[in-house]
Amino acid sequence: MSTAETRTRTTPGLVPVPETSRATERRPPEPPAGAVPPRRSSSAFWRLLGSELGLTFRRPRNLVMLGVLAGVPVVMGVALRLVAADAELGGIVTSVAGNSLMLTFASLSFLVVLLMPVAVAMVAGDAIAGEAGTGTLRYLLAAPAGRTRLLAVKYLNAVVFSFAVTAVVALSALVTGLIMFPVGPVTLLSGTTVPVAEGLLRILISVGYVGAGMAALAAVALALSTFTEVSIGAVAGTMVIVIVSQVLRAIPQFDGLADYLLPARWTGFDGALRSPIDTGAMAEGLLTFGAYIVLSGSVAWARFSGKDITS
Amino acid sequence: MRKGTFVRWGVPIAAAAVIGAAIGAGPVVAAVSGDPALPERSAQQLLADAVAAVERTDGPLPMSGTVRQTASLGLPALPQMGGESPLALLSGSHEVKVWYGAQDRLRVAMPTHMNETNLIVNGDEAWYWDSDGNTATKIKIKAGAGWAHEPATPAPTPSDLTPQAAAAKVLAKAEEHTAIGVTNTAEVAGRPAYQLVLRPKAEASLVQEVRLALDGETYVPLRVQVYAKGSAEPAFEVGFTQVTFTPPAEENFVFTPPAGAKVEEQTLGEVISDGKAGEHTGEHTGDAKAAKDLKVVGEGWSGVVVAPMPDLGSLPAEAPGGQGDPAEAKALLDNVLKSATPVSGTWGSGKLITTKLVTVLLTDDGRLLAGAVTPEEIVRVAGTR
Amino acid sequence: MTREAGAPFGAAPPSAGAAIVTRGLTKRFRGGQVAVDSLDLDVPRGSVYGFLGPNGSGKTTTIRMLLGLVAPTAGEHTLLGLPLAGALPRVGALVEGPAFYPYLSGEANLRRFDAADPTASGATVRRRVGEALDRVGLGAAAGKRYRNYSLGMRQRLAIAAALLGPRELLVLDEPTNGLDPQGTREVRALVKEIAADGTTVFVSSHLLAEVEQMCTHAAIMSTGRLVAQGTIASLSGGQVSRVRIETPDPAGAARVLAALGLADVRATDAEVTAELGGHAPERVNAALVGEGVAVRGLSVVRPSLEDVFVGLTGEGFDVDG
Ligand SMILES: Nc1ncnc2c1ncn2[C@@H]1O[C@H](COP(=O)(O)OP(=O)(O)O)[C@@H](O)[C@H]1O
Ligand SMILES: [Mg+2]
């Protein structure tokens, strides 16, 4: 509604006078006091998320990280090709050299240990702490972005980035593999052979699973991010958690704990490479990720919604 | 502080409680409800039922599931070990997947990260697949050679006795050294189960009790736990974490070596050497000569094996199964010896190695004593020549 | 609904109530320090309200509480008579200096903050951002990265961000901080212009002169406490004007002034001052000249806010903090 342009105001007992203020002419009808039009709020949410994604995927630092992650499978592919040419090696080298799709699994297996978590922690750990550090958080909240809404947008953004990281690795590895190694039926870990199309489907399943695992890490990083104004602190804290988990996982005495550690679950994507697909272990992995997301998310919310913004 | 601090932090606390409850749900629910989901049975009835069930169905039921083995024997921390090394089974936990179709249709898979070993038995043909080595081994089975259907479930099938008689006989023999009880409230892999509790009567035994869980419906053994004295967690445990009693898909028992794999052939006799001596202390089984000199002192649970000490230098190279890396075995041995405590007595002196379940004494006069008994007991045995 | 289709800087539709009301607003930080101590502010609509106090007197903390960034330890407040979430879209704010994304252009930065406002429309953002940048004279530097902005440009961009939507209230925390004299003049002119549109401006400052020049109302803070508030005139009204006469004959002048009935006559070597009271300065001058006292200069000294401050707290207003 932008019809009412020049209006007159009537006051009982007084002669109606046309209002003269410049501002009045532009004055739209009054919304009810304090109302944020409800129908708008969902589109406003997507607008903020769009802004957030634009920030994340245009930020030079993040692009460099994605570039590095895309480069590793290429390097791995070249190296494995050189190695496989002159030596009879077992295990993963043989399977990668033997089939173009296997490079994707090998790359995920290698990068999921440290490099992908670093990339995700950099974005998710920066989410709140980074804004607090530069002081932009106070202007976002005064806008008003709304604390719960901002946190939700920040997390969704980190989730998108988590899947982007995983997809970039998988795509780069897939393309490298297709160029360097023979295309053909894929031999699974169980020794069963499946057609290429099914191999691609299994890659898709792995990407979904690893992406979910990274999203769980993003929730942890986001929670830490609400406790500090130094984003490096949140990133480093997240990596300490990852590395301590890796160590605990390697110690037999803490074996019972391994099921509940993120790094131990990330590698569970290889369930997609078994016959039949190890749905039990993968579902448990997804449940673990879900538990991390719920717990860390609620901690992040409890902290952030009550935090004094003094930066 | 902002209003509602407690309310806000209540959310993550509630989330943690829900997650904690979900993780501990199985045992907690079972413990809290405590309803005997199963009718009561005496040990004798239970064994009889189990034997009858096996006979009635002509062998165990078709099933599939995940078996987890956990050992915390209290050994010194082992150096990094490959997933398949038999030594690796001595600590930590390991998972295998089992698909059981019939006596001669079986698949056992041991999944490790980006790797899998498979044993697939189908009739008189068997395959062993190792994805790491990209090798498929075809195993010919000689006529009459049977397959243990599944590691944890040795099922006695004494066909010449009635189940009741067999049970009675077994129990009579066992009760000489063991107190036997039955509980009907256990739950294994989400299924109600009977639990046979065997408690050694011998004072000197390190074993507190052995618990054997039998499925309440099919009487298939689902779990074995060995508890050491003074420890609330089992020192050794093997059992199903997930199990279904439906016939597994046929494709599990079909194996075609993938293109590009190395294919080898072996006959059964070569693969399965006489592993009968193997308890979890199997590493110390020596060669045939050692076996001859072997004697057991004491009875039942407090028995102590006395043997001439094998040459420690050559032992690692002879690690049974031939699979373990000699360097690994050596590292383990060094580690273990490092933690040994010197002891001496009227019988001489030696080195004592204690774990939660097993005590080993290496005497300086070249004897090796091992048993699931207390150090005092093994030292006493060392003194009785 | 096209609230944004209206004027970008004009007054938004009025909501009932005063622009800012606080009652017993208190903030005690974790260390136990009381930054703001039971503050009762009443900021009338349409005023240019100076929030004056030396550094560390609790101005920024008060503004953070007003904007919901910091939770008060006690007390309450309303903006525009609305609940906070409803009020904030109608409030433009500058808190403790500019803060932007260094790797984004000025324009991209404004779009970013506009996206955070749930009532702002993405359809009109381009126009509104352009107008806000033009308003603060940054139109030409719109595409430049924030990292390369000068201090003055950064400050102006922050004001542009506060002008992105139709605002009923602008809260500006030390908007001239760090600006050169030229920048300071520009900001003051901008504030007057905005106020002329009917927008209430709440501006904090540690500069007495600034508040005296810009504002219609003022509140004076000292170590977290409100010392005084009201119109500039009423604040100054508590103190009386003095007449100051430069003369080679201070003794004679003092006599004349005393004879006229002026109170508190003080004489020094070359000048005499006294409370003017109800006397007209020109009459005082005529009387002096009539008595043959040479008058080299005569001026009326109106009381400044500094005098008010000193009078109320007994301390000097520490301009440099
Ligand atoms: N986050 C904080 N923690 C503890 N004390 C603070 C914090 N922020 C401000 N203060 C203290 O509160 C007082 C008021 O600060 P501030 O509101 O920034 O004053 P102003 O803006 O008037 O200079 C100061 O003494 C300052 O040291
Ligand atoms: Mg300040």
Image (cartoon, rainbow, N blue to C red):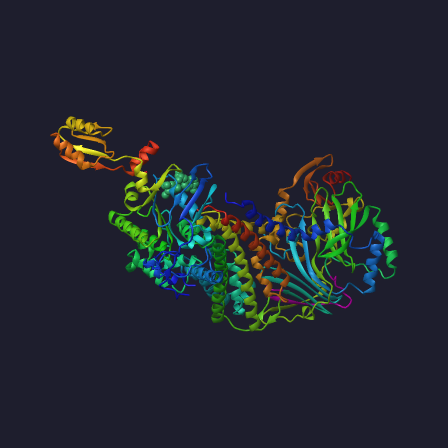
Q: Quadrant of residue B137?
A: bottom right
Q: Residue C115 in the image: state x and y as whole percent.
A: 42, 59
Q: Is residue B139 magenta?
A: yes
Which residue is situated farthest in the front direction here?
A13
Q: Quadrant of residue C2?
A: bottom left
Q: Quadrant of residue C308?
A: top left
* Residue in the foreground of this view, choosing between B128 and C157: C157
Residue A88 appears in the picture as rendered = no
Q: Residue B135 in the image: state x and y as whole percent.
A: 61, 66
Seen at 76% across and 46% down, the residue is B209
Residue C11 appears in the picture as rendered = yes
* Residue in the foreground of this view, choosing between B92 and A311: A311
Q: Which residues are magenta?
A: B130-149
The relative height of residue C220 versus residue A21 in the rendered view (above or below) is above
Seen at 87% across and 61% down, the residue is B160
The relative height of residue B47 versus residue B122 in the rendered view (above or below) is above
Q: Is residue C75 magenta?
A: no
* Residue in the foreground of this view, choosing between C31 and A174: C31
Q: Residue B25 in the image: state x and y as whole percent.
A: 68, 52
Q: Quadrant of ligand 1?
A: top left
Main secondary-structure element of the magenta-colored stretch:
loop
| Relative horizontal placement of residue B237, taking residue A232 as reference (left or right) | right
Quadrant of the image containing the C terminus of chain B: top right
Q: Residue C42 in the image: state x and y as whole percent.
A: 40, 44
Tell me how many marks there are: 0
* Residue in the foreground of this view, choosing between B300 and C166: C166
